[in-house]
Amino acid sequence: MIDIEVSVVIVGAGPAGLATSACLNKLSIPNIVLERDDCHASLWRKRTYDRLKLHLGKDFCNLPYMPFSSDFPTFVPRVQFLRYLDDYVTHFNISIRYNSNVESSFLDDNNGKWRVIVKDTSLNVNEVYVAEFLVVATGENAEGYIPKIEGLERFEGQYLHCSKYLNGRELYDKNVLVVGCGNSGMEISYDLVNWGANTSIVIRDSVHYFTKEMVLVGMFLLKFLEVKKVDKLMVFMSKLRYGDMSEYGLRRPKDGPFAQKIKGGRTPTIDVGCVDMIKKGKIKVFPAISNIKEGKIIEFENGESGQFDVIIFATGYNTTVLKWLKDYKYLFNENGMPKPSFPYHWKGENGLYGVGFSRKGLEGISYDAIRIADDIILTINSRGSE
Ligand SMILES: Cc1cc2nc3c(=O)[nH]c(=O)nc-3n(C[C@H](O)[C@H](O)[C@H](O)COP(=O)(O)OP(=O)(O)OC[C@H]3O[C@@H](n4cnc5c(N)ncnc54)[C@H](O)[C@@H]3O)c2cc1C
C-alpha cells in the first residue's frame, strides 16, 4: 500500500469539514476531505426529516466567506441549505474523497505525522493517508443515541431513532410515541399529527420553548444586552405567547434559556406548532417511560400506560471520535468531546484539531474553521522562518 501524503486531512464532509477545507483553500494549504458516505452533508441529505428548516435565522448559519443569497428566506429550508452547501463545495473547489471510511488514525512517533487508515467502501480496498495536520469533523451528531429502557428488546412494535424519521406518510392512524422534547422531538410530534398519527410525547425534564422569531430577537439582543436581561425578556415573551403550560406537562426551568445554554445545558426548544397541538389535546404528554410491559404496552413513571405501534427516540446523539481516533487524548476526553473548554476547544496537540464540537451549531463551526486554518498557516510559516 502506498502512503498518500497531504498537508491536512479532514475527516468528515459535513458543514464543519467543508468550512475548514474552504478556509484552508483560501490560504492555499493543500488538504483533502475524507467522507464515509457517498455524498457531502449526508446528515442533511439523508438523516433529517423532510420538513426541517434551519432553526436559527440565516445570518447565524452561513459558513465562512459565503453569506446566504439575499433571496433566501430567514429560516432556510433543508433543500435550500443543501443547494447552498453544493454551491459552497463548487465555489471553494473543495476536494472530497467519498466512500472513504476512516477506520483508524494515530500519531506516528517516527515522523510526528498522522497516519490515517481509510477503507474505500466502493472498491473494498484500504488506503493510508499521511498528514502533518489532522482535522476531526465527524460531528457531534455522528450516531443516534437510544437510552436503555427496561423491556425495549421485547417491544412488539417498531422503534427508531429520529435520524431515521423522514416523514409520517406510513404512520396514518398509528399510535406513535415520541421520546424527547428538544427541537427534533417537538417538531416530529407536530409533523406526525399533520400526517394523521395519534401522537404522544414523553417530556421528562423542564424545558424552555419559544417561536423561531423570539429566538431571533433574543440572539440579536445578546449583542447589546447582558444575558440575564435577555433571558428575562425571552421568558416574558414565551409566557405572553403560550401562558402557563404546566398543567399540560410543560414546565419551564429556573435558569434562563441563554444562561442555561452557556452553562453547557440544553438548548431551548424552538416550537413550530407543537405547543398549540398539546394545548388542543392533539398531542398527549407523558412523563418518563418506566418500562415496556408486554407486546406494545408502555408504562410511564406516573403509573399510566398506553399501547403504541411505533416509538421514535429524539434522545440525542453521540460522537464517534473514540471509535477511530486512537490518539484522541491529544484533544478529546473519554466522551469524544474536546478537553479544553470554549474558546480553546478547537486546538489539540501535535497538529490535531476538532471542528464543530462546541455545541454552538453552524455559527460555532464557522468560528472553529477560521481559527484552525489560521493556526495551521501560522505553524507552517513559523517553521519556514526558523
Ligand atoms: C436535526 C438537526 C437540525 C439542526 N439544525 C441546526 C440549525 O438550524 N442551525 C444550526 O446552527 N445548527 C443546527 N444543527 C446542528 C449542527 O449545525 C448540524 O448538526 C451540522 O450538520 C453539524 O455539522 P458537522 O459537519 O459538524 O457534522 P455532520 O453534519 O454530522 O457531518 C459529519 C460528517 O462526518 C462523516 N463521518 C463520520 N464519521 C466518519 C468516518 N469515520 N470517516 C469518514 N467520514 C465520517 C459523516 O458521514 C458526516 O457526513 C442541527 C442538527 C440536527 C441534528
Image: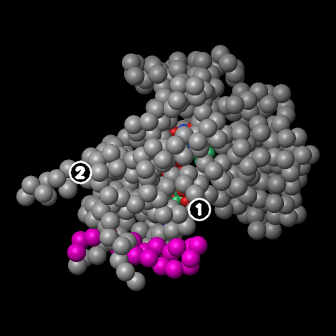
Query: Which part of the image, by quadrant, shows the C terminus?
Result: bottom left
Q: Main secondary structure of the magenta part?
A: strand
Task: Indicate the secondary structure of the residue bearing disc 2.
Answer: helix
Q: Which quarter of the rendered picture does the N terminus lie within?
A: bottom left
Where residue 255 sits: x, y (%)? Answer: 51, 31
Instruction: Kindly give the residue lying farthest to the right in the view shown.
Output: 173
Which mark is first along the chain, 2 or 1?
Answer: 1
Tell which of 322 and 235 is nearer to you.
Answer: 322
Q: Is residue 34 left or right of residue 187?
A: left
**Disc 2 marks which amino acid?**
Ile
x 78%, y 32%: residue:
278
Q: Does the magenta stretch include residue 126?
A: yes
Q: Dot 1 corresponds to which residue?
A: 38
Q: In this orientation, which residue lies closer to the viewer: 85 or 115? A: 85
Amino acid type for the residue under numbered disc 1: Asp
Tell me, yes or no, whether the highlighted magenta stretch contains residue 186.
no
Q: In this view, does 160 lie to the left or right of 217?
A: right
At horizontal 81% and vertical 64% (from top left) the residue drawn is: 155
Residue 3 image position (x, y, % from top left): 35, 77
Dot 1 lies on which element? loop
Q: Is residue 8 above or below residue 5?
A: above
Residue 288, given in percent of the width and then of the height, sits at: 71, 48
Observer able to see residue 322: yes
Structural crowding at the residue carrying mark 1, measured as other residues with C-alpha within 10 Å and reported as few (<14), some (14–19) or many (≥20): few
Residue at 83% x, 36% y is: 194
Residue 141 in view of the camera: no
Dot label at residue 377: 2
Residue 208 x %, y %? 60, 31
Which residues are drawn in magenta?
111-128
In the rendered image of this protein, does residue 227 appear above or below residue 6? Answer: above
Q: Is mark 2 within 8 Å of ligand 1?
A: no
